[in-house]
């Protein structure tokens, strides 16, 4: 039975799942571009009584990934590596730049591509940049921004989207964070986008928590949250514990939650090399046990 209710001339319809089976997406992995990260997401295969864990090989398809952390933990690097990885595979990517003007973002992407041995000429026509710094009126009007993003996705066959950062869309108005993030999330879902939303932390937030500017509304809405953090080894005890020089900085990554598929719950050591390439080294517990 189909149930309908009309409110303000809009008819809301409740359908049985059998009526929407054609629109149910297939779950598969979308390479993140970050070495070591793709195998942290997994699904299961069932054969009789046997249950087998199978790596997904990337972010869950059509998932909106929330990446948060304090400054200098690799958030934007992950967003850029994801965009470059997808473009190098022949897919069109939308990069919504909220804080960095396009020429400087392009400069960063170009340097990152060189470090990753990706031919810039092969990808420069596949990454589309929506520069919010150039159009501040879009930052203050989420309805207009959603419309522009939707049109860009439709006209350019966009498969993946990066927003850096969503925090810039509700600066000084964090009470609206839930509304703004929800509307952007709905656009991503409408077009089956595999997306990265980067957000920042306030100084009062715990580094290891999923909370970001805008509160817990952001991770509650989005499909998956990745928390990046860093720690200075300021004591000899810490340096000995992590088998690193005194005064060194270690970076970590933890998948706080993912509603789309299974995920590794451990904290992993992250390495950011001199070229600005981010990769996972392994679980922190392995480092401590050396």
Image (cartoon, rainbow, N blue to C red):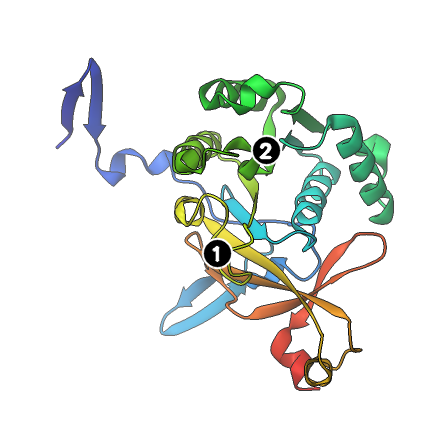
Front position in the image: 50 or 87:
87
Label 2 sits on a secondary structure element that is strand
* Quarter of the rendering occupied by the N terminus: top left
Q: Position of residue 130 (x, y in %)?
A: 64, 24
* Quarter of the rendering occupied by the C terminus: bottom right
CA distance separating discs 2 and 1: 26 Å
Front position in the image: 84 or 205:
205
Please indicate whether residue 122 sits to the left or right of residue 187 in the image.
Answer: right
The residue lying at 46 percent from left, 29 percent from top is 187
Q: Position of residue 56 (x, y in %)?
A: 55, 57
Q: Counting other residues with Cα less than 10 Å from the Cα at mark 2, is it few (<14), some (14-19), or many (20 or more)?
A: many
Does residue 125 appear in the picture of this structure? no
Q: Which tag, 2 or 1, sits closer to the chain's start? A: 2
Please indicate whether residue 123 sits to the left or right of residue 83 in the image.
Answer: right
Front position in the image: 266 or 85:
266
The residue lying at 78 percent from left, 77 percent from top is 246
The residue lying at 55 percent from left, 41 percent from top is 197
Task: Check disc 2 and report the residue beneath it.
Answer: 159
Quarter of the figure with residue 88 = top right
Task: Check disc 1 and report the residue beneath it.
Answer: 210
Label 1 sits on a secondary structure element that is loop
The residue lying at 59 percent from left, 18 percent from top is 155
């Amino acid at each position: 039975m189909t149930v309908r209710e009309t409110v303000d001339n809009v008819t809301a319809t409740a359908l049985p799942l059998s009526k929407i089976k054609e629109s149910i997406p297939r779950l598969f992995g979308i390479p993140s571009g970050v070495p070591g990260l793709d195998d942290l997401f997994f699904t299961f295969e069932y054969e009789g009584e046997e249950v087998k864990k199978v790596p997904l090989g990337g972010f869950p398809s059509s998932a909106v990934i929330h990446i948060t952390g304090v400054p200098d933990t690799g958030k934007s690097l992950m967003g850029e590596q994801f965009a470059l990885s997808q473009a190098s595979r022949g897919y069109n990517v939308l990069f919504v730049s909220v804080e960095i003007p396009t020429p400087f973002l392009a400069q960063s992407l170009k340097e990152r591509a060189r470090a990753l041995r990706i031919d810039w000429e092969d990808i420069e026509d596949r990454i589309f940049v929506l520069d919010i710094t150039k159009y501040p009126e879009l930052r203050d009007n989420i309805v207009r921004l959603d419309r522009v993003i939707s049109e860009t996705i439709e006209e350019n066959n966009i498969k993946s989207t990066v927003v850096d950062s969503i925090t810039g869309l509700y600066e000084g108005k964090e009470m609206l964070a839930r509304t703004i993030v929800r509307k952007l999330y709905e656009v991503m879902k409408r077009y089956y986008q595999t997306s990265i939303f980067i957000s920042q932390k306030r100084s009062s937030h715990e580094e290891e928590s999923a909370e970001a500017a805008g509160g817990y509304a952001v991770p509650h809405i989005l499909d998956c949250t990745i928390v990046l953090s860093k720690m200075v080894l300021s004591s000899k005890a810490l340096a000995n514990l992590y088998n690193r020089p005194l005064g060194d900085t270690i970076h970590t990554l933890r998948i706080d939650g993912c509603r789309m598929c299974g995920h590794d719950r451990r904290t992993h050591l992250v390495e950011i090399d001199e070229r600005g390439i981010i990769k996972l080294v392994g679980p922190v517990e392995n480092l401590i046990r050396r």
